[in-house]
Amino acid sequence: MINNSVHRQSLVLLLGLFIPLSIATAEQLVDVQAWLQKMQRAAHTLNYEGTFVYGHGSQLSSMHIIHRATPKGEQERLIAMDGSGREVIRDANKVTCIMPDRKTVVVEKSRALKHFPPAFPNQIENLADYYRFTLNGTGKVAGRVTQRIEITPKDNYRFGHHLWVDSKTGLLLQTHLINEQGQPIEQFVFTDIKYLDTIPDELLKPGVDKKGFTWIEAKDDGKKVAGSFEGMDISWLPDGFMEDMKINKKLPNSIIPVEQVVFSDGLASVSVFIEEEIEHDPTSLLGGTRMGALNVHGRTLGDYHLTVIGEVPYRTVKKISDSITNQTRQ
């Protein structure tokens, strides 16, 4: 038999090892949350102008950004630096995409997911069940001293993130999206940045004459897509994922409405699209593919085509797709 006093000493030793670790983890979580809250405020309250590079795989694109915060909301102008002349104008209500190379303008409602720089949650207590949040030293980005933050998933159904936050202003200056092998698969980094007291209206106006362009307005029609998600059951989602939004829309050049449901854990998100299957449609995706950091899986289900897409590992989108059943046909 084990001596009781020895057992108690061992228990005290174990508690002594684990309790300080828990306290340290909790304290670091508070510190990380304070940095993310500072980053959130900076993204919405600062006036700035700069150039950033977005890259995935071997593809890189450079954009110039002008951002203004006003009492009525934020305004933003993004200008492609690739010679195409493309611009994106965003305000509190809408996003206008101007494509001179296609003589086209696309207008849609402004959504939080459209923000540049990328947005991250600032309340992370619930996310701590699925990710580890750590501060990992400092660095320099675009000549600015930054605090580095690492967000590491606790399972293999999500990607990780490395963030570099301006130590003085709180603006997010660089991010890496990290795959299961610990490799960056997508990056966003400012190459130059300047903070401004005021930004004149002229800097936020399009630099392209839109005369003669085709205008396309993407509208949510507000109507249920008959027979789509009604009766559909998604029996598996990664822990912490819940329905975030549901959208019904008609895509440009399509007469068939598409229903989109977005699921999120508060950091990662996955979209499920369902549309009526067009017989022998060669454009319908069957199986898996990858587009940059996005993994996609498509399949047919009765009279419908399902597409699951998200910045998550392929195993995640496939497992979600495989779990969808049509209860009305059983």
Image: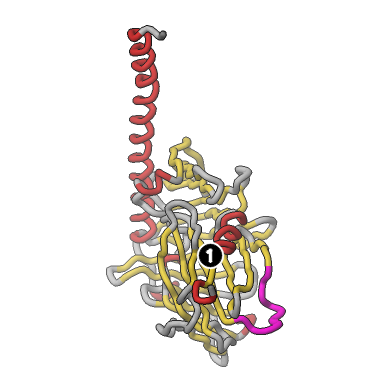
Residue name at image x 47 percent, y 74 percent = 231
Residue 69: x and y, percent? 34, 65
Q: Is residue 176 visible?
A: no
Name the spot of residue 97 as percent of width and height, x first.
52, 77
User: Magenta part of the protein: which range?
Assistant: 277-286
User: In this rendering, is residue 154 above or below 69?
Assistant: above
Q: Is residue 140 magenta?
A: no
Instruction: Depth check: give the residue in front, 131 or 205.
Output: 131
Relative image position of residue 314 (x, y in whole percent): 62, 56
Q: Residue at 43%, 72% (x, y): give it.
A: 246
Residue 234 vs residue 123, the one in the foreground: 234
Can you identify the residue that label 1 sits on?
64
Q: Secondary structure at mark 1?
A: strand
Left or right: residue 193 compared with residue 301: left
Q: Amino acid at mark 1?
A: His
Q: Furthest residue to the front?
A: 330
* Left or right of 285, for residue 46: left
The overriding secondary structure of the stretch rendered in magenta is loop
Q: Residue at x 51, y 62 (%)?
A: 270
- Which residue sits at x=58%, y=78%? 304
Magenta region includes residue 279: yes
